[in-house]
Amino acid sequence: MTEAAALDLHATARLALACLDLTSLNDADTEADVATLCERAQGPHGPVAAVCVWPRFAAFARRQLPANIGVAAVANFPDGSADIERALRDTGEIVQSGAQEVDVVLPYARLQQGDEQAVSQLLNAVRRGCPGLTLKVILETGVLADDALIVRASQLSLAAGADFLKTSTGKTAVSATPQAATLMLRCIADDTQAAGRVGFKPSGGIRTVADAAIYIALCEQALGPQAVQPRRFRFGASGLLNDVEALLSGRSAPPKPAPGTY
């Protein structure tokens, strides 16, 4: 590797770190696990953008972290049920916790069935339920699969007031892909109300700095270099932190990701 390439890779690693939502969403998570996550979020190479946890841990995580690291929690996760009451219970718990961000799963099965009304009703309800908080809508693009459905999910999310479009829960066989990212970013860029405001979050399966570079480039091409910063670009890929730290520390090989991270 040339010196210039090495420097570029280091710059990419630092950018990926600054844009990372460090995540733990295992069914068996405990406060001890979340405390460890919050400690990792404040690593030797700098802080991540946010940590993402279950709603029941959001208040605990907020107490563990400095103000410059956000707390996100998930609603309607991971199945994307069309149950509005359930989604609002999750959202209300997140709001009361003092967290800054809600990651809600779009009812993708209903979209596949052609029920756009159910999708919009849930997303609009959640948007109303978390005023002032950053709302990331998870499309579950690996399940939607069809380009037209991914585009429509993006459009419905933007119409409901999403602040970010997010690819995946990280709990399905297919998570983020460059193809899905390109479609979602194009929807943001083509929407005059969203183009200068809404962010993008590729999530799941992004484990190396080289992987991250692909999505950084796609975002830069679609939304401009000014969009590639934590306010408008995130990674939902906790395994990525291992490769970032290995590269910035000069280790030859990164440690294996912890079980249950993505």
Image: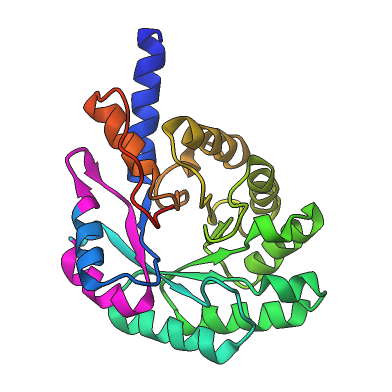
Q: Nearer the viewer, residue 86 or 258?
A: 258
Q: Nearer the viewer, residue 37 or 68?
A: 37
Q: Quadrant of residue 89?
A: bottom left
Residue at x-position 41% and y-position 72%: 133
Q: Nearer the viewer, residue 223 or 4?
A: 4
Residue at x-position 59% and y-position 88%: 84
Residue 58 part of the magenta-drawn span: yes
In this rendering, the answer to whether 5 lies above or below 86 is: above
- Which quadrant holds the N terminus? top left
Residue extending furthest bottom?
85
Residue 244 in sight here: yes
Where residue 74 sits: x, y (%)?
A: 44, 71
Q: Nearer the viewer, residue 113 or 95?
A: 113
- Give the extent of the magenta segment: 40-65
Q: Quadrant of residue 111?
A: bottom right
Where residue 219 sits: x, y (%)?
A: 56, 40
Residue at x-position 35% and y-position 69%: 100
